[in-house]
Image (cartoon, rainbow, N blue to C red):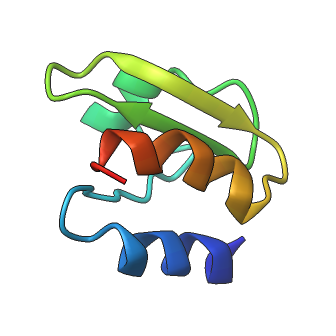
Amino acid sequence: MHPIVNGIKKEFKACLQLERVNFHAETQWHILLSPIGTPEFALFDSSGNIIYRWVGFTEKDEFVEVIKPLCGG
């Protein structure tokens, strides 16, 4: 998943902040996410609300179809 995530990070760096969260570490992101599986990805709005969630292996296109419209594309 690292190459896909790194590609998403590079492609959408102007409008998206990516944070890596350790499944077992009690951080603010872990608390907001309340993870249910691994790998797991969540898209938050600026208020900290989850607006989309992916669980398990996810193709790049699945991320792009959700993120691109939000980034003006």
Query: What is the quadrant of the C terminus in the image?
Result: bottom left
Image vertical order of residue 1 relative to residue 69, above or below: below
Q: Which of the 4 image quarters holds residue 11?
A: bottom left
Where residue 21 appears, x then y in whole percent? 45, 51
Does residue 49 appear left or right of residue 1 in this picture?
left
* Residue under the point 75% across and 44% down: 38
Does residue 24 appear left or right of residue 44 in this picture?
right
Query: What is the quadrant of the N terminus in the image?
Result: bottom right
Farthest residue, direction right: 57
Image vertical order of residue 2 relative to residue 31, above or below: below
Does residue 69 appear left or right of residue 38 in this picture?
left
* Residue under the point 18% across and 68% down: 14
Where residue 62 appears, x then y in whole percent? 71, 48
37 or 6: nearer the viewer = 6
Image vertical order of residue 8 relative to residue 55, above or below: below
Farthest residue, direction front: 73
* Residue under the point 57% across and 55% down: 64
Image vertical order of residue 71 relative to residue 53, above or below: below
* Residue under the point 54% across and 39% down: 66
Label total for image: 0
Where residue 31 appears, x then y in whole percent? 37, 23
Does residue 57 appear left or right of residue 6 in this picture?
right
